[in-house]
Image (tube, coloured by chain):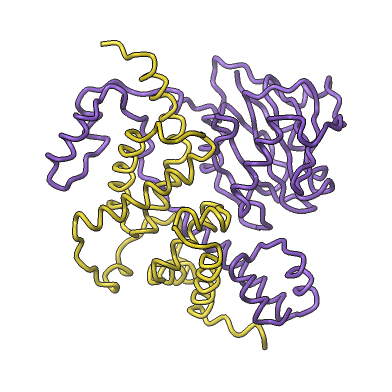
Chain colours: A purple, B yellow
Amino acid sequence: MNFEEFEKRILADPFTTDPQCLEQAKRSEACARLQRQAQALDQQLEAIMNVPCPPELLEPMPDMAALSDADLDSERLSADDNVVSLGSIRNRGQSGPAARWRVPVWAGVAASVALVAALFLREQPVEPVPTMDTGNALVAELVEHMSHEPYAMRRADTAVSDTALASVLNPARASVDEMPALVSYARSCIVNGRSVPHLVVQGEAGPVTLLLLPDESVDGPISIMQDGIEGVLLPVGNGSIAIMGPDKASVEAVRDQALAGVQFDI
Amino acid sequence: MPQPANDRARQRRFDRLVSVYREDMYRYAYWLSHDAQLAQDVVQDAMLRAWRSLDALREDEAAKPWLLTIVRRENARFFERKRLETVDIDELVGAPTMHLATEHDTDRDDLVQSMQTLEPEYREPLVLQVLLGHSTKEIAQIMGLSDGAVLTRLHRARKKLIASFDLGDPAT
């Protein structure tokens, strides 16, 4: 591969795991330099793209079901700027929304009981029981989800803010006492029909995905080996946590600490 | 009047999906228009449209690209409907932004400016990849392009940004 071809590929995806590109970066200092430049650029880009969302959009949703299509149409047509705002709908006396969005779970809810994973896990076998690759529907869902956000799985040295992390953990009733490594990615995602925190931590052996699943209980550890992804699904309280990476070493590097730090409030 | 059970279930589904992805919807809309107020209006409109066509979404796992596609179409409709006047690029670049930077950072300011002046066809796939984490295939679906066209645009987008910073030629 010459420099031009490398440039074409690396500028299309600076965090590519294409073996040819990785090999080329090892062979050529110019290619390695370009890769570093492109990766640094992406980290800066992500930081500036992460503009804060206006508080109005983060308010609980109005009662959409109480509004007929006719209501929406008439309001849309009557508005001077052709845009009907959710705020205006809310002001029409519609009932409010699910209060769960406002519950400050990050700090701990007084009425809730925190199940500390570290305590729970003392009673659990940590070594996973190998399973058939396709034998578990949840595992298939987890791996499928990984394929939707491949760009999250990249090496990075910029941490997401505490606020961003809390905004992802809170709705899932999850908290983390101490992260095993720098958290470079935090998003809420839909997995198996539920909203769950999707985190990427930068472990010593590379980036690792943590999917915190407060509503997915498993009887015991389940190993994950599918589509080039290795990992483990482990029980935590009444839920579970999936730890996935490109290889076993990267997963093991963060597994124990991740488990000890994660807790779900019930 | 009490809601029928199916309406309540529909509302719950809508709340769940939109609450997860509304920040992504807003950020995507913001970088499509780089106008905070317009982005907010586009997202609100997109939410209404999503509510009305929620039954067309068969799998919740596909909600993110589905919602982003709605935002994209709403943004286009908005510009078409409003027949927005051309904005002077100097005025736009000089306008206050809502970025998270709390201290003066020249490199960061320069990058914001470069992003704002980058042509939309290059800026959009970059946002979908870098910020929203989508694969080439998903970006292609959202933007209605081939995979190859997406890769070409991503390559050119970064090349333009690197050139704008005058980082030097890595080949030398």
Position of residue B117 in the picture relative to residue A89 (left or right) = right
Locate residue B41, reporting x and y percent.
Answer: 28, 47
Locate residue B17, reporting x and y percent.
Answer: 46, 34
Position of residue B126 in the picture relative to residue A68 (left or right) = right
Q: Is residue B160 above or below residue A57?
A: below
Locate residue A258, reporting x and y percent.
Answer: 73, 37
The residue under the point 31% across, 57% down is B35
The residue under the point 72% across, 47% down is A208
Name the residue nearer the viewer: A109 or A68: A68
Q: Is residue A27 above or below residue B83?
A: below
Locate residue B127, reporting x and y percent.
Answer: 48, 58
Name the residue nearer the viewer: B90 or B81: B81
Position of residue A69 in the picture relative to residue B8 (left or right) = left
Pick the quarter of the image with the N terminus of chain B. Answer: top left
Give the farthest residue toward the bottom.
B172
Quadrant of the rendered image containing residue B87: bottom left
Pick the quarter of the image with the C terminus of chain B. Answer: bottom right
The residue under the point 19% across, 35% down is A73
The residue under the point 12% across, 39% down is A78
Position of residue A96 in the picture relative to residue A3 (left or right) = left
